[in-house]
Image: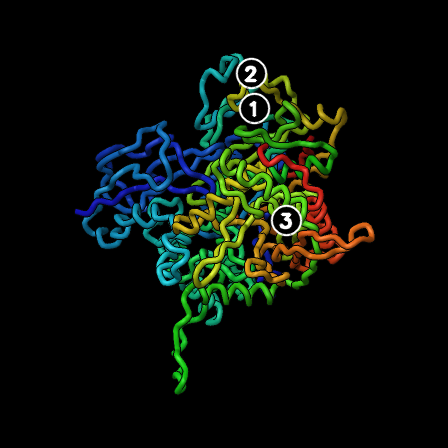
């Protein structure tokens, strides 16, 4: 029957390379505004941040364990963020994904969306031989008692922003400055730590994009270089070739 | 001046409450329609909720940090003069949105009037984030290219074309685009689909032996004129439930490649256990014991061994469902419904028995909610009530399998080369051959059969 073999909704995948948190947020803001006006496709931004600690809407100050001055001295920025969740750290070696999607046209269910992000990561990790899972009441992806991926989402008119951060091979010691996501009793882990060897970042990205497309019912199109410039979403050219991990 | 209630929106099917994190306006502030009014949080998701109407925020009823149930009133807005008419529905919003309970599953005509329950009327929109009326999208309707056929399909399905992504030349919306959209919304959380206001298809009705879950299907085309009765004929309009059953049955037959395989199961052990334990079980647990939880348990075991049966097909993909939500067909006067036991695989035998008895009770007293029928991943039906040996059930789309339980009957069978009297039952599995081959289907059914024949589970665990 026709309804079974129809084209799925397209989603443009953009590899941003290394990008500052504020610049990434500004880009998401523009993308979400466009999507709310029904202009442009769903977009998945993939990137890596410079070291930054972000405070979500529900962040409690006591979960930031080091003073801002001290952090600045170590080259770590602190940014407020309008995503859900508490406090977290981003930095090199982390695969950060910001899906800007119109859930109104996919499925209007925020819990389903969060569980779907988790599921895509879990399936991706299964592909590297890592058995990862969920913890009741603690959004994110876990390997035993270590959290390998954090999730925080913002929704406005069913358009999503923010997303997930998967610890591929970050400097885990940076997490000592915070109580990640406000959960004190668990550790933060990384794929590198679990596997004991480096992971092929490009392969991981491809797998993750594949699973996200699969689970969200989206056809993932890798954007050609220059896509952003053509869409006037970024005035200046962003280097997209910096190698992740 | 009219006052509109602002409700806590339901941000997802299983979400029952939300926490107000921040008011973006103060009491006395003017606010425009669709302007962000407050923010809520659920789990790791924050959402910005726009105002349903234009006016003045007169009362904030829920403070920041407070958690309230969905559809509860969180604020009141006195509407601006000019906007009063446009905002009128907002006042009613509390009612329909809260009316999630289906009043009647067993009396078809009232069921027709309950579509609001399956798809909240536009009135519910105000409290939803993202009221997606085309007018607010800033995109003139004229820019949507589509054919008359697509527009007709859209109106039949209550679809706002502005929401559909066109893949044809010049972003033209093709029939496939539209059907894809309908399909996706169907898979989505029904209760929060404000743009399907009109069609009178309640998700409560279900087909015989293959009842529905809360997925919306294109409703029948506009009313056809009634045929003239012949001399010895009577013309009676189809009830909404019958129409819905008819649509879904035909849709399933057209979509799935049905094959039915039948196994004979020696049910004697379970019958003996049932007869021995029923009195004690019911006295001790205050739950009626039936054969149903035995079958559910066995089918769950089979689904765990063969997860392909707990799946659905979407386009060129298979979706394997990690959770087992078991639909149980319940016969009603004039039709059938299929309440769903959610996460049935996580329940003990006693838990299943309770769930079955509770759903049956609520079905009888007409207290089933739309959510009780939604998102089943597999279905068990019971054509053996009047003694039928077996039937070939129709799959309940988008599921890919359905087990029909035939009548339990004492039968002479050969056991160890001697004839013995055993209680036998036939299990018929209809499966979708697009996804499942006969070998797999049979292995699944063998697992179910063995589970029942070698029953060793404690009923009280």
Q: CA distance from mark 1 to mark 3?
A: 39 Å
Residue on which disc 1 sits: A89
Q: Are marks 3 and 2 on the same chain?
A: no
- Does residue B141 show up? yes
Please, which chain is the residue tagged with disc 1 on? A
| Corner quadrant of residue A236 | top right
Determine whether the residue tagged by mark 3 lies in a helix, strand or loop.
loop
- Does residue B171 show up? no
The answer to whether the residues at label 1 and label 2 have Cβ atoms under 8 Å apart is yes
Q: Earlier in the sequence, mark 1 or mark 2?
A: 1
Mark 1: few, some, or many residues within 10 Å (few <14, many ≥20)? many
Q: Position of residue B429 (x, y in %)?
A: 66, 57
Residue on which disc 2 sits: A177
Residue on which disc 3 sits: B310
Please, which chain is the residue tagged with disc 2 on? A
Identity of the residue furthest to the right in this view: B417
């Amino acid at each position: 029957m026709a309804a079974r073999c129809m084209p799925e909704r397209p989603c443009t995948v953009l590899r941003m390379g290394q990008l500052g948190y504020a610049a990434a947020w500004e880009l998401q803001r523009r993308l979400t505004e466009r999507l709310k006006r029904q202009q442009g496709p769903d977009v998945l931004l993939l990137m890596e941040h410079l070291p930054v600690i972000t405070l979500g809407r529900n962040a409690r100050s006591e979960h930031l364990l080091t003073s801002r001055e001290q952090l600045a001295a170590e080259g770590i920025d602190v940014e407020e963020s309008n995503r859900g969740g508490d406090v977290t750290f981003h930095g090199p070696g982390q695969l950060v994904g910001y899906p800007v999607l119109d859930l109104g046209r996919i499925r209007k269910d925020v819990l389903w969306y969060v569980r779907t992000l988790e599921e895509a990561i879990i399936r991706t990790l299964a592909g590297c031989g890592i058995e990862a899972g969920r913890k009741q009441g603690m959004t994110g992806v876990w390997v035993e008692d270590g959290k390998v991926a954090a999730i925080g989402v913002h929704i406005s008119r069913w358009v999503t922003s923010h997303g997930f951060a998967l610890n591929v091979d970050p400097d885990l010691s940076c997490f000592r400055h915070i109580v990640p996501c406000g959960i004190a009793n668990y550790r933060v882990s990384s794929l590198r730590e679990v596997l004991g060897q480096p992971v092929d970042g490009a392969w991981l990205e491809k797998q993750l994009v594949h699973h996200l497309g699969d689970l969200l019912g989206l056809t993932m199109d890798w954007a050609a270089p220059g896509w952003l410039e053509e869409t006037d979403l970024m005035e200046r050219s962003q280097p997209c070739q910096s190698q992740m991990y | 001046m009219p006052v509109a209630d602002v409700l806590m929106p339901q941000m997802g099917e299983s979400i029952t409450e939300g926490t107000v994190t921040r008011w973006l306006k103060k009491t006395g502030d003017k606010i425009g329609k669709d302007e962000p009014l407050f923010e809520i949080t659920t789990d790791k998701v924050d959402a910005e909720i726009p105002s349903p109407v234009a006016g003045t925020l007169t009362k904030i009823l829920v403070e920041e940090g407070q958690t309230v149930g969905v559809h509860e009133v969180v604020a009141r807005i006195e509407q601006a003069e000019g906007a009063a008419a446009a905002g009128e529905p907002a006042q009613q919003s509390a009612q329909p949105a809260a009316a999630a309970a289906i009043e009647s599953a067993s009396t078809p005509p009232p069921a027709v009037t309950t579509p609001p329950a399956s798809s909240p009327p536009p009135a519910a929109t105000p409290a939803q984030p993202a009221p997606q009326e085309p007018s607010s999208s800033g995109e003139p309707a004229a820019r949507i290219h589509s054919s008359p056929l697509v527009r007709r399909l859209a109106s039949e399905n209550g679809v706002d074309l502005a929401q559909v992504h066109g893949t044809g030349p010049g972003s033209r919306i093709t029939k496939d685009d539209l059907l894809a959209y309908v399909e996706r919304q169907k898979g989505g959380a029904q209760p929060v689909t404000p743009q399907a206001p009109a069609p009178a298809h309640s998700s409560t009705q279900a087909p015989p032996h293959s009842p529905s879950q809360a997925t919306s299907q294109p409703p029948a085309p506009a009313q056809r004129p009634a045929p003239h009765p012949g001399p010895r004929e009577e013309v009676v309009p189809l009830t909404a439930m019958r129409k819905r059953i008819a649509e879904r049955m035909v849709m399933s037959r057209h979509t799935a490649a049905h094959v039915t395989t039948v196994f004979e199961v020696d049910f004697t052990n379970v019958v003996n256990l049932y007869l021995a334990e029923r009195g004690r079980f019911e006295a001790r647990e205050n739950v009626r014991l039936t054969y149903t939880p035995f079958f559910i348990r066995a089918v769950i075991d089979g689904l765990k061994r063969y997860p392909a049966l707990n799946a659905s097909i979407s386009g060129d993909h298979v979706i394997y469902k990690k959770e087992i939500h078991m639909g149980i067909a319940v016969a009603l006067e004039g039709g059938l419904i299929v309440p769903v036991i959610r996460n049935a695989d996580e329940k003990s035998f006693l838990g299943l028995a309770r769930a079955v008895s509770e759903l049956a009770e609520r079905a009888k007293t007409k207290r089933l909610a739309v959510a009780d029928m939604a998102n089943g991943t597999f279905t068990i039906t019971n054509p053996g009530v009047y003694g039928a040996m077996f039937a070939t059930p129709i799959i309940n789309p988008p599921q890919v399998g359905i087990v029909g339980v035939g009548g339990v009957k004492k039968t002479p069978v050969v056991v160890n080369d001697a004839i013995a009297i055993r209680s036998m039952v036939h299990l018929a599995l209809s499966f979708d051959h697009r996804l499942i081959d006969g070998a797999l289907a049979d292995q699944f059914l063998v697992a179910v059969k063995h589970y029942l024949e070698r029953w060793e589970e404690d009923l009280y665990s």
